[in-house]
Amino acid sequence: MNELTYLRDLIIIFVVAVAVVIILSRFKIPSIAAYILAGVLMGPKSLALINDIHRVEVLAEIGVSLLLFGIGMEFSLKKLRTLWLNIFVGGTVQVVLTGCITAVIVYSMGYDLSTAIFIGFFVSLSSTAIVLRGLEDRGELNAEHGRFALGVLLFQDICVIPMMLVIPILAGGRGSSDVFGSLIYSVLVITCSVLAAYLIVPRLLKLVARTRQRQLFILSVLLICIGVAYAISSSGVSLALGAFIAGLVVGGSEFRHQATADIISFKEVFTSLFFISVGMLLDPGEIMMNIIPILLILAGIILGKMIIVFITGLLMRLRTRAVILASVALAQVGEFSFVLFGAAAVYNLVPEPLMGNLLAAATISMLLTPLAIAAGPHLSAGLGKLPVFYRAMNIKTAEEASSDTKGWENHVIIGGFGFAGRQLAKVLKENNVKYMILELNINTVREVCRDGEPIYFGDVTSRDVLERVGAERARELVVAVNDPRAAERAIIAAKSISPDLHVTVRTDYILDIENLRKLGADDVIPGEQEAAVELVRRVASRYGCDEDRLESRLKLIREEKE
């Protein structure tokens, strides 16, 4: 009978979720927000179509684990090493600043120190599942703001362990020696699990692959995901973070791509259950009764975290556009905050009605996140309309470019001044071709401007900025930013000003070519393709391959679509 009840609940969840997502997709509402709203609709505090949230939460935890497992496979330990600055520096600054400022504010309102410190913990965490899923859907995980957000989120997830261990101390229950012993135990378990996984997992996958049974391979991948996650979670680490570590192990093996393809359908189904379970926590009636304090807490959380993440990003010398997008993405409270709340509830660390209002504000912040991520590019595009701020930063803006480049014709606009942009500028200068540069990294603008380069602070995705730098009179726009969404917006903005403007775009992947051409790009340079050309050229040249045949082959590689 219980099994049939479980099945009935799943049918209701999927029917309502599909209907809500289809309806809201017509209004351009992101699917994550639609899932959360579906949870609100069918939860026990609304239509009560589902009364036992616990059954859904069990499946939801599997979903979050699969999500983090998949993301772990995408990055692998080798790639993760490039994020160490974002993880340890960015994460430390964000968590410490957020926690301390929140604790001071709560303590000044008359609550005791233990409550203030715990709420500091609670607010400092962001939603790994929602943010990474949102960035993944938009293809922005490898963009500058995506890497920064991932690094901060990973550090936050690691911090859950000591936070959980400190909660009993805040309640007056355990000594510091117990906490230190638990931390040592956690580190030992994680280290042993990772080493064992590295020794066993590649051999296991190779053995399974030899059987050529796809079902067995899928079962083995799921076993590795849940098994390693469970083993690591015994040390006090969250199951999701354990799954991420398992993903890193598989990501370092030769079977990464096959594993990703095989678990993607499982990941999508179970992850949607997590977002639905978040919506079920909301009580619309309770929210309406306490709407003012909840909105005040919500505004404080979102604005406060945005400012702190913005400051953190600037300290790390990231581009302003990336900092703004990351600030918007990380402004909510995370799912692991609810895990902390469950532990704190045992000790009554947070009194009512503050506990209820805080939980409601946290859940609403998660609901707003997908919408905020979608609106982030529009927010960053409005930067060019704040000249007073940029004068204070002592940098040249696109507004000044309109006078500096007045009368220019047939010039080249370079969007982004990374390695590719710098090399292009050198060649153009050597050949006396007029060019100007748009860049969103304030430090880069300052430094390059001192060298006499025509560089201006401006967003290449903004129509207003492109008009100020004479896009209608320019000969070519070169988009050299490491952000696929920004490249798309830049093409649309440029072509709306001048349909005949030649637009050249740099992208990482071959799969982006068709979409960018549809939007109006004249030339698309995929890094993946050019790397393949150079790889083939260098290796072939060492073996005395026929030059003509080699050039024909390289031409075919450049024409390859996927």
Image (cartoon, rainbow, N blue to C red):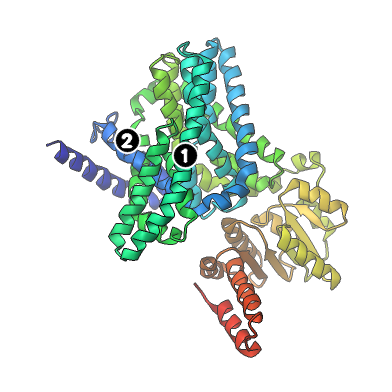
Disc ID at residue 192:
1
Nearest to the observer: residue 292 or residue 30: 30
| Horizontal and vertical percent position of residue 366 | 45, 36
Q: Give the residue type that dot 2 points to.
A: Glu
Nearest to the observer: residue 427 or residue 157: 157
Identify the residue at image location x=49%, y=49%. Answer: 248
Quick check: 166 above or below 272?
A: above
Nearest to the observer: residue 525 or residue 78: 78
Which is nearer the N-term, disc 1 or disc 2?
A: 2
Q: Give the residue type that dot 1 points to.
A: Cys
Nearest to the observer: residue 331 or residue 136: 136
Quick check: 15 above or below 461?
A: above
Judged by depth in the image, the label closer to the viewer, 1 or 2, is 1
> Dot 1, crowdedness within 10 Å: few (<14), some or many (≥20)?
few
Identify the residue at image location x=88%, y=56%. Answer: 452
| Horizontal and vertical percent position of residue 122 | 50, 26
| Quarter occupied by residue 482 | bottom right
| Horizontal and vertical percent position of residue 173 | 45, 12
> Dot 2, crowdedness within 10 Å: few (<14), some or many (≥20)?
some
**Res. 523 visible in picture:** no
Q: Quadrant of the N terminus?
A: top left
Which type of secondary structure does the marked residue at label 1 adopt? helix
Marks 1 and 2 sit apart, C-alpha to C-alpha, by: 29 Å
Identify the residue at image location x=39%, y=60%. Answer: 206
Residue indicated by mark 2? 57
Left or right: where 195 falls relative to 505? left
Which type of secondary structure does the marked residue at label 2 adopt? helix
Identify the residue at image location x=62%, y=37%. Answer: 88
| Horizontal and vertical percent position of residue 347 | 41, 14
